Amino acid sequence: MARQAPAKTAPAPPADSHYLRAALKLAARGKGRTSPNPPVGAVVVQGGAIVGRGWHRGCGLPHAEVEALREAGEAARGATLYVTLEPCNHVGKTPPCTEAILAAGLNRVVFGQRDPNPRVEGAGAARLAAAGVEVAQVLQAECERFNEAWTKWVATGRPFGVLKGAASLDGRIAAAGGDSKWISSEASRRFAHRLRAECDAILVGVGTALADDPQLTCRTERGRDPLRVVVDSNLRLPATAKMLSCPGRTLLACLEGAPAERRARLTAAGAEVLPLPADSAGRVSLPALLDVLGRRGVVSLLIEGGSEMNAAMLAAGLVDKLFIFLAPRLIGGRAAPGLVGGPGVARVADGLSLRFERVRRVGPDLLIEAYPV
């Protein structure tokens, strides 16, 4: 299909940013629940008052625009719709939102992010403009940042990789004897569980799974347990691992030649075993794993996998964002593991450069939000 030329949009008055931020707050309610669709929020404004609110609650359910229009009812006629993503103009699991907008008699639509899918980008705005609806765009950067995971998945077919780590101020994730509980504060751990609730899957290496026997569940109110993914080349995870008896699903990524008897035992314990090709080092190919996850609709992947897994994901270019908690503690010790393992680099100049997006306090800890550059 030929790419749709974006419709020209009208200048936006200052109040538009206020109402679109209200729509963004609604969209946040759907984070972690809509994949492979994006979380979207919408409000209908008539006479300076919000008369309808909506957000996308899950794949296959009505889109945010439809929810907001239903709440507004007849008050939508002649009103303005604010929506975080350009309204769709194609038939998917639900009808086109553009048709609902036109049927409601709206005079104006203000959106934040254009649909990044090259097959449909600009089609929604163009359809509305052609029907005489005034169209404007505001807060583009904020809305694109909000939907960065979905945008990456649409463009590449792979999940957006979020590396979460907790370290002492001198970069240690455990003491020399292996003890790691707890480096970060309770407040930081609550934040980490909110990240789990927002991501579709959580990834660890088998070393972390064996050392900690984690449940990898989300312990927030109304939080959703992500898909648990363990990179376990030779299926060393025992069938008695805690995660196998927890609610939710566990996927074990192993080599194609992993022992058949271990595969049968772990399958019987409730795990899904996924054989994958090896990389040049003879371990599970991480790009192949992310390709499979992407095809399964995993849009966002939280990486919580210890220093070696962190190093491998960073080296493969599969980390898109980092959340690093730094605790006000010094651990020291030559044998104490650092945040990133692996062979390291020979020169400082060869290290991965990051852009600090935000630094804030979470309880007594510092939280650094950063992007690779």
Image (tube, rainbow, N blue to C red):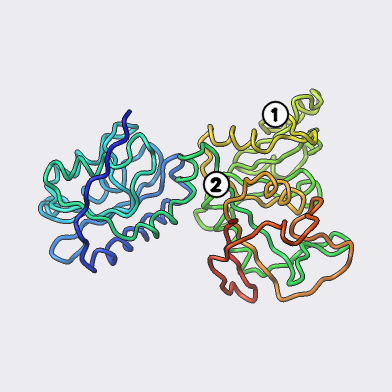
Quadrant of image for the C terminus: bottom right
Helix, strand, or loop for circle 1?
strand
Residue that label 1 marks: 276
Tell me which amino acid carries mark 1.
Leu
Image coordinates of residue 192 in percent, x first then y, are 60, 60
Image coordinates of residue 83 in percent, x first then y, are 29, 53
Question: Distance from label 2 to label 1 (Cα)?
Answer: 20 Å
Is the residue 291 above or below the residue 369 in the image?
A: above
Residue that label 2 marks: 160
The residue drawn where x is 64% and y is 59% is: 353
Q: How many numbered badges does the structure rendering display?
A: 2
**Mark 1 Cα-neighbour bin, 10 Å: few <14, some 14–19, many ≥20:** many
The residue drawn where x is 51% and y is 43% is: 299
Q: Is residue 360 left or right of residue 64?
A: right
Quadrant of image for the N terminus: top left
What number is the disc on residue 147?
A: none
Nearer the observer, 314 or 263: 314
